[in-house]
Amino acid sequence: MTNMTIDIEASLKKVNEYIDQIDVLQHESHTEGKKKLGELNASIKNFIRIAFQDGEKKLSDYKGSFPMYVGILGREDTEEEKQEYYLKTLSSIKNNLIAYQQELQLRLESKKKRSKLDKIEKETKISEAEAKRRASVVETKLWGAVIELIDMQRNELKKRGKLTQEIIGLRTELGELRLMLVEFLKKADK
C-alpha cells in the first residue's frame, strides 16, 4: 500500500482522459481496439497503484471486475461473441473509472471544504488575537484612568490638608488676636 500524496485534480483529469479513451474504443471493433485496450489497461493499473492510498486493494477489485471469458473447448468464438466480450470489458473498465472519478471528486470537494475551514479557523484566530489586543488596550487605558483618578484624589487631599493647616493657622492667629484684643481692652478699661 502506497501512502504517496498525489494531486487530486491531476488524478481526476487523468481518469477523465481514460474515460474519453474508453469512449473512443467503444466505437472500434475488437480487432482494431484490442492492442490499444491492452495498453490502456496497463496504464490504468499503474495509475490505480499510484493514485490511491488503498491502491493494491482497488487494483485487486479492478482486476476482479472483468467479465469472465467462457470458451468452449474445440469451438472458436464468433466475431460477434468476441465483439460482445470486448464491449463488456470496456464497459467494466469504464464503470471502475466512473467510480474512481466520483471518489476523486468527493475528495476534491472535501479538500476544498477543509481549505475553507482552515481559512475560517485562521481568520477566527486572527480576530481572537485582535480582540485580545483591543481588550488589553482597553484594560491598560482603564488602569491609566484609575491611576489618574487616584492621583487627582491624592492632590485634592493634599490641597485639603494644606487648607486645613491654613484654617488651623488662621484660627490660631484669630485666637491670638482675640487674646491681644481682650488684653488691650483690659488695659484700656483700666
Image (tube, helix red, strand yellow):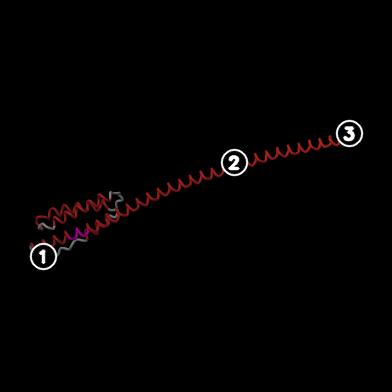
Residue 10 in the magenta stretch? The answer is no
Q: Earlier in the sequence, mark 2 or mark 1?
A: 1
The three-letter code of the residue at mark 3 reads Ala
**Magenta-drawn stretch, dominant element (helix, strand or loop):** helix
Find residue 26 and report its image quarter. Answer: bottom left
Q: Nearer the viewer, residue 115 or 59?
A: 115
Q: Secondary structure at mark 2?
A: helix
Residue at the spot 16% in from the left edge and 62% down from the top edge: 88
- The residue at the point 87 percent across, 35 percent down is 185
* Residues at marks 2 and 3, CA–CA distance in whole angstroms: 58 Å
Question: Label 1: how many residues lie within 10 Å, few (<14), some (14-19) or many (20+)?
Answer: few
Q: Are circles 3 and 1 on residues that touch, CB within 8 Å? A: no
Q: Viewed as shown, does residue 1 lie left or right of 32?
A: right
Is 109 situated above or below 162? below
Labels 3, 1: front one: 3
Asked whether 80 or 11 is in front, the reply is 11
Q: Earlier in the sequence, mark 3 or mark 1?
A: 1
Q: Which mark is residue 73?
A: 1
Q: Residues within 10 Å of mark 3 (few under 14, many from 20)?
A: few
Left or right: 6 as drawn, with respect to 84: right
Q: Locate residue 103, reporting x and y percent.
A: 27, 57
At mark 1, the secondary structure is loop
**Residue corresponding to mark 2:** 148
- Magenta extent: 91-96
C-alpha separation, residue under disc 3 versus residue under disc 1: 164 Å
Q: Which residue in the protein does label 3 denote?
A: 188
Can you name the residue that lies furthest to the front here?
Answer: 189
